[in-house]
Image (spheres, helix red, strand yellow):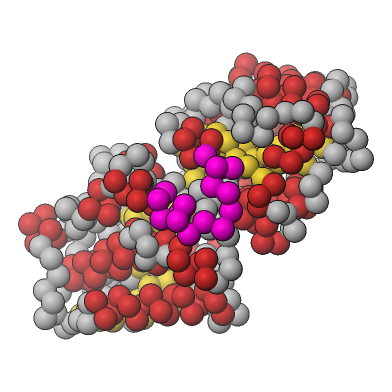
Amino acid sequence: MRPRQVAALLTVAALALSGTACGAKSSKDDKPSANGTAGAAAEPLDPNTKVTISVGCQPPKTAKEFRADWDADVAAFQAKYPNITIESKDAFPCIVPETFQAKLASGEMENVYYVYYTDAQGIIRNKQAADITDYVSGVKNVADVNPLFLQTLKDEGGRLYGLPRKAYTMGLVYNRKLFARAGLDPDKPPTTWAEVRDHAKKISALGDGTVGYGEYSAGNTGGWHFTSLLYGAGGSVVGPDGKTAAFNTPEARNFLQLLKDMRWTDNSMGTKQGHRWEDLMRLLGSGKLGMMIGAPDVVTEAFNNFGAKAEDLGTAALPEAKSSLLGGDGYMINPRSTPDQIKAAILWLSFHELTIGEGQFNYARNKESGRPVGIPENILWGDNDSGKREKELRARYSTVPTGNFAHYDQGSASIPPKVEPPNAQAVYALLDTVMSAILTRKDANIDDLLAEAEKKVNAVLSRTK
């Protein structure tokens, strides 16, 4: 997990200007495309029309391997479409909240720009992304994407304004080696919270600082996991209007009581609390953490940066989940782009983000570079042909035991994803206090904590545009 920046709530005056986006050119005298006809939009790009598009989120020069991959992909794409020129714009991070709003509102944003899912609805409401619904008609790579992941990039009328790059939902990450040592079956991860509690007790009984189940409570990560657990129980953090807190419910009280019991009655969560994101990663990397909730990219992070052995770890679906917190990102297209630029952008995104075996799904290249392959970090597709081909290719070039992650692959596909609440980071910061209190104070009153947090979150939401 990386804490998500607050949603972009932007003005649109500058975007009403005519012309193309910064750095973007077309050989035709096209007008901006927001109101183009469906028929013209569905027509393929004329191969004799030269088009230049600017594309954001090129890896920085400091990330040499990833930068080289990107440049190689651009070269391969331009060889396939010699009439299209990609102007790559590097940035790290891809979004800087302090400048993102101004850049988008001023018209300086690239033709193809990177977004978090949490930003998408604000951008759509403010008409700062092109409607690409008709442009993707008949594009198989787009048609095969799980509709649930496209939904976050659509408006209330079902019109599409972006394409996903990555999608994942929360699950359970667990240490298979500790399971075996505790007499538990690593191939049968828990499917209920009662089983999680039982397994956590048995793992913590191993001693030597071993934590059965770890949880966050600082740096906004506690609020993030609060949301994940509440979504799993079928609840919501905010009401349908996005202006009122909706988490002071029996579902929230039940799982908070569960965590409190695990912490103080079972002593299965360790005595050290106040964990931020990297703290559980370190525990996982040291082999001292039995279970935590998280997406599969937790395994990659623990392997790459915290010394974990990927073969020791496994992932499963979130226990008893009625829905699961959706994470991910994608790209939107500047509405000042011309129809030809939008068509070129769709071709690029289809190639680089949605073609199995190319771009981000070039597993052969990743394996050759020594990167972990085989972890289901990106579940963009369902159980269709594309999904099956992605799994087959991932297994073919795997550098980790794919069976360790099969329970997540199989179980998460049927769990509806749910997007983060509005003004997520501010809300998470307030919900940190609830998680921190129950994990650090044995006498913490759950009802009082929820009531106080509800007042504060309502105040934040009332100021959210």
Q: Which residue lies furthest to the top in this view?
A: 250
Residue 215 at x, y = what percent? 74, 38
The residue at the point 74 percent across, 35 percent down is: 180
Residue 47 visible here: yes
Residue 35 at x, y = what percent? 16, 58
Residue 16 at x, y = what percent? 28, 66
Q: Residue furthest left?
A: 39
**In terms of image quadrants, where is residue 195?**
top right
Closer to the camera, 412 or 396? 396
Residue 330 visible here: no
**Residue 444 in magenta stretch:** no
Closer to the camera, 113 or 394? 394
Total number of numbered discs in the rendering = 0
**In terms of image quadrants, where is residue 217?**
top right
Span shown in magenta: 391-406
Q: Which residue lies furthest to the right in this view?
A: 208
Residue 6 at x, y = what percent? 55, 52
Q: Magenta region's main secondary structure?
A: helix
Q: Is residue 99 above or below residue 402?
A: below
Closer to the camera, 340 or 336? 340
Q: Is residue 400 above or below residue 335?
A: above
User: Is residue 163 toward the left or the right of residue 59 in the image?
Assistant: left
Q: In this view, does 201 lie above or below 308?
A: above
The residue at the point 81 percent across, 26 percent down is: 201
